[in-house]
Amino acid sequence: MPGKPKLCYFDGRGLMESVRWLLATAGVEFEEEMLETRADYEALLRDGVLLFEQVPLVEIDGMKLVQSKAILQYIAAKYNLYGKDLKERVLIDMYVGGTSDLMELIMSYPFTVPEKKEEQLNTIRSKAKNRYFPAYEKILKQHGKKYLVGNQLTWADVHLLEAILMVEEKYADILTNFPLLKDFKTRISEIPTIKSFLQPGSQRKPVPDEKYVQTVRTVLQMY
């Protein structure tokens, strides 16, 4: 019997958080190994498990996987969250690509120099409000279904909910003019495994703080 997936990353969100979301949605228990020092990272490099010298690293099904997109695609396919055919998969990839672009803006915010933070926040709000959320509102309106793709929950839905909640942490009123997205958020949040992941005490990570930022900078030598 294979053991639980093991996630190796910092004790924070970053590129690993979407992996946590997807495993939790699938009801899969996982373990975490936290990178806390430069020595921890260098040990992984010496072991040769970081193919491109980057984290996240996920050990699953006897494999040591890097590159977050590849990791997420594998998990989505393994746990039936990747559509029923090739056409559904390309839509899922397209929608996930959009939410990923928005989420990257938010993930980079804690690392932004103080004098640029307000500008970054304005960019996040503008792009969420004027580019990304209108697109997903349109998708839901056009097909009139509960999910973004097909008739069942997929990775695209999970990723969009994660993105919505990330933006709401910055701007609580961001969905004011998006009634279908507001309903979508409520509906997807009530899926039992997701609802559990959203509760205090789960493996979901909090909003990045200065300690997380400093750890990442130190480990990756971001000077």
Image: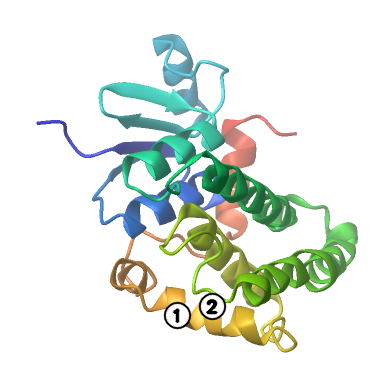
Which of 156 and 218 lies nearest the eye of the viewer? Answer: 156
Disc 1 marks a residue whose amino acid type is Arg
Disc 2 marks a residue whose amino acid type is Phe
Element at badge 2? helix
Residue at the (86%, 69%) spot, across then down: 122
Residue 41 pos. (x, y %): 48, 25
What's the CA distance linking mark 1 and mark 2?
5 Å
Which quarter of the rendering shows the C terminus?
A: top right
Q: Are marks 1 and 2 in contact (CB under 8 Å)?
A: yes
Residue found at the far left of this picture: 1
**Vertical relation: 182 (above or below) 132:** below
Which of 18 and 201 lies nearest the eye of the viewer? Answer: 18
Residue at the (77%, 72%) spot, across then down: 134
Question: Where does label 2 land, which residue?
Answer: 184
Looking at the image, residue 153 sits to the left or right of residue 140; the answer is left
Examine the rendering and report whether any part of residue 35 can be seen.
no
Q: Quadrant of residue 141?
A: bottom right
Which of 136 and 202 lies nearest the eye of the viewer? Answer: 136
Looking at the image, residue 113 sits to the left or right of residue 193; the answer is right
Disc number for residue 187: 1
Element at badge 1? helix
**Vertical relation: 90 (above or below) 193:** above
Which quarter of the rendering shows the N terminus?
A: top left
Looking at the image, residue 209 sits to the left or right of residue 61; the answer is right
Residue at the (46%, 24%) spot, across then down: 39
Residue 61 pos. (x, y %): 26, 28
Residue 86 pos. (x, y %): 52, 39
Disc number for residue 67: none
**Vertical relation: 114 (above or below) 134:** above
Q: Residues within 10 Å of mark 1 (few under 14, many from 20)?
A: few
